Every structure is written in structure tokens, then in C-alpha cells.
């Protein structure tokens, strides 16, 4: 078995129809995955904050922040799927 390429603490590989071996990914792909990891962390953090606040204004603020982060997360997730990037996040 071949070892997958490792980029910024994330195991990545590119799937193709002709080859199933792991390939080294581009720097751009690594940036996309790192952004996806950061967005996931930010989403978890915002959800934890939402669970622990009681002020109605802050609740609204976190709801909008979570919606915004979720939209960006979905965009980068689709970008990874379109490029064929598989990552353990």
C-alpha cells in the first residue's frame, strides 16, 4: 500500500478514474483544506458560545454568525468535492 501525502496535519489524496494512488496535492488544495478545517473549528466555537449565552442580542448575533460560517463551510466543502480532494477533518 502506498502512503498518502500529508499536508498541514491533514491526510489528503486526489481520486481519479484512472489511478487510485495518492498524489501530492497543490499548495492551493492545501489552503482550501486548511480553510475548511478553520471554518469547522469556528463553527464549533460559535455553537458552544450560543449554548452558553442568555442575552437576546448576542443570541441573534451568534445565529447569524453560524449561518454565515455554515454557508462558507458548504462552499469550501463543495470546492473540495469538485476537485476530488478527500480529507480527514
Image (tube, rainbow, N blue to C red):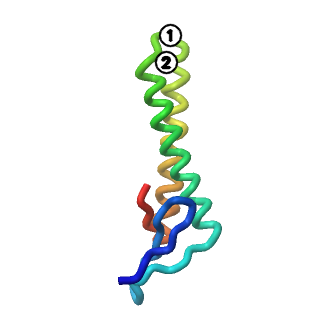
Residue picked out by circle 1: 55
Q: Residues within 10 Å of mark 2 (few under 14, many from 20)?
A: some
Residue 73 rendering spot, x and y as whole percentages? 50, 48
- Quarter containing the C terminus: bottom left
Q: Is residue 35 above or below residue 49?
A: below
65 vs 17: above or below: above
Residue at the bottom extreme of this rendering: 18
Q: Residue furthest left?
A: 1
The residue where tag 2 is placed is 59
Name the residue: 50% across, 80% down: 23
Q: Label 2's element? A: helix
Q: Identify the image quadrant of the N terminus.
A: bottom left
How many marks can you see?
2
Judge left or right: residue 61 versus residue 21.
right
Q: Residues within 10 Å of mark 1 (few under 14, many from 20)?
A: few
Res 16 visible: no
| Residue ID at (57%, 60%) | 8
Residue 25 x/y as whole percent: 56, 74
Answer above or below: position of 54 versus 84.
above
For the residues bearing labels 2 and 1, Cβ distance under 8 angstroms: yes
Front position in the image: 63 or 15? 15
Give the quadrant of residue 26: bottom right
Tell me, yes or no, if residue 13 can be seen here.
yes
Separation (CA) of disc 2 from disc 1: 6 Å
Q: Could you say whether the residue bearing mark 1 is in a helix, strand or loop?
A: loop
Q: Nearer the viewer, residue 56 or 48?
A: 48
Amino acid at each position: 500500500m502506498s502512503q498518502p501525502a500529508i499536508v498541514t496535519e491533514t491526510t489528503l489524496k486526489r481520486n481519479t478514474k484512472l489511478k487510485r494512488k495518492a498524489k501530492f496535492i497543490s499548495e492551493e488544495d492545501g489552503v482550501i483544506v486548511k480553510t475548511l478545517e478553520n471554518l469547522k473549528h469556528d463553527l464549533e466555537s460559535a455553537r458552544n458560545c450560543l449554548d452558553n449565552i442568555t442575552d437576546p442580542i448576542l443570541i441573534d448575533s451568534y445565529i447569524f454568525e453560524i449561518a454565515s460560517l455554515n454557508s462558507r463551510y458548504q462552499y469550501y466543502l463543495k470546492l473540495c468535492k469538485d476537485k476530488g480532494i478527500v480529507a480527514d477533518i
